Image (tube, rainbow, N blue to C red):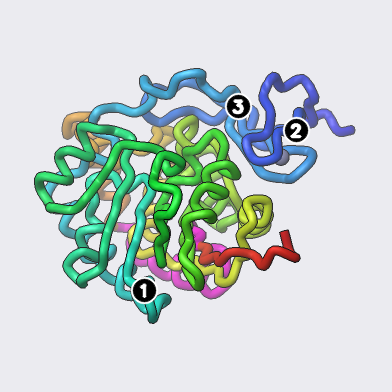
Amino acid sequence: MSLTQTLAGAETCPVCGAYGGKTIYAEARDPITLDSFQVIECFACGVAYTSPRPSSLDKYYPQRYRGYGGFVTRVLNALYSLRVSRWARLNHEGNSVLEVGCGPGLMLATFHRRGWRTLGIERNEAVAEKARRALGVEIVATPVEALPADARFDLIIMFQLLEHISEPVALLRECAKRLAPGGHLITNVPNFSSWQSRFAGPMWLHLDVPRHLAHFTPKTLAATLAQAGLKLSTLSFASLEHDPYGWVESTINKVTGRANTFTRFLMGLDPFGPAVLLSGVLGVVLVLPAVLLSVVSWGAGRGALLEAIATKAAPAEK
Ligand SMILES: [Zn+2]
């Protein structure tokens, strides 16, 4: 056993429940509170996870978490629209979609405009209520298991959700039960084995401890889906809103030693100041190399956001 290995972790792996793992990062700081965490790789199943896992995450989700302004929202809307077009082509027969963790409901609204039957789940009742009123889509604040037992969906989407969940296999199982015959489950998570993760280490923009409790690779995500009775059918890696921005912000993090200066400004956590200005100037210089690196990383299967499309596994394969 090497010096970097530990069996002393009080934590169990969120995916398989085993104790103990190898320390990947001895210190990774929360870019919002600056609290320090570790990232451990489970000895049993190989998934990486955040340790310690806070008993309450309330203080780690500021009011403005992902509460971007009008311009950023418009850009995201345009990008979500492209994504929804691609996903909508997966199902030829049905047109019902459930999004778990739908936040302000931008993707659901895009499906709704295309004539899909939509349902969103958002645990923050205030966010759900605001989205219901603004977009006219149905959003409930109940867990998946509280949906009617016979509810079935052609598409179930978990966009940037699974990494936040303390028991991801249990949630995936509940979703698998609600897939219509021939239905697809789509889950997008940050790719822990992406080039930008390997480059920036604990300063990677999309590591985001302790909000991200599990850090998946293509291999560990496929294994997690399999535990929940789901079969991976397609993996892809291209994300216009994650890759170039992730390269730029992670590189600035490494150069300046300050975490997520520009993102904190966009979220309204910090006012404009010299550090934001410096970050902006560096950002302009880095845009072109970041776009080029992103495109190459997509081709190599090492992009920052991992998208898995899964179907129900045949009973014999469970
Ligand atoms: Zn494990």
Which residue is at 15% across, 40% downward? 130
Indicate which disc, 1 or 2, sits on the residue closer to the N terminus. Answer: 2
List x then y, in percent, for residue 138.
22, 50
Indicate which disc, 3 or 2, sits on the residue closer to the N terminus. Answer: 2
- Which residue is labeled 1 in the image? 94
- Which residue is labeled 2 in the image? 18
- Side of 69 where 208 appears, left or right: right
List x then y, in percent, for residue 259.
40, 34
- Which residue is labeled 3 in the image? 51
Mark toward the viewer: 1 or 2? 1
List x then y, in percent, for residue 155.
41, 64
For label 2, being within 8 Å of ligand 1 is answered yes
Mark 2 surroundings: few (<14), some (14-19) or many (≥20) residues within 10 A? some
Q: Residue furthest front?
A: 150
Between 106 and 120, the one lying in front of the other is 120
The reply to whether residue 262 is in sight is no
Mark toward the viewer: 3 or 1? 1
- Side of 156 where 36 appears, left or right: right
Gap between marks 3 and 1, in whole Å? 41 Å
Three-letter code, disc 3: Ser
Per the rendered image, the range of residues in magenta is 285-307
The correct choice, above or below, for 199 with respect to 265 in the image is below
Mark toward the viewer: 3 or 2? 2
Q: Quadrant of residue 215?
A: top right
The reply to whether residue 309 is in sight is yes
- Side of 264 where 91 appears, left or right: right
Q: Quadrant of residue 88?
A: bottom left
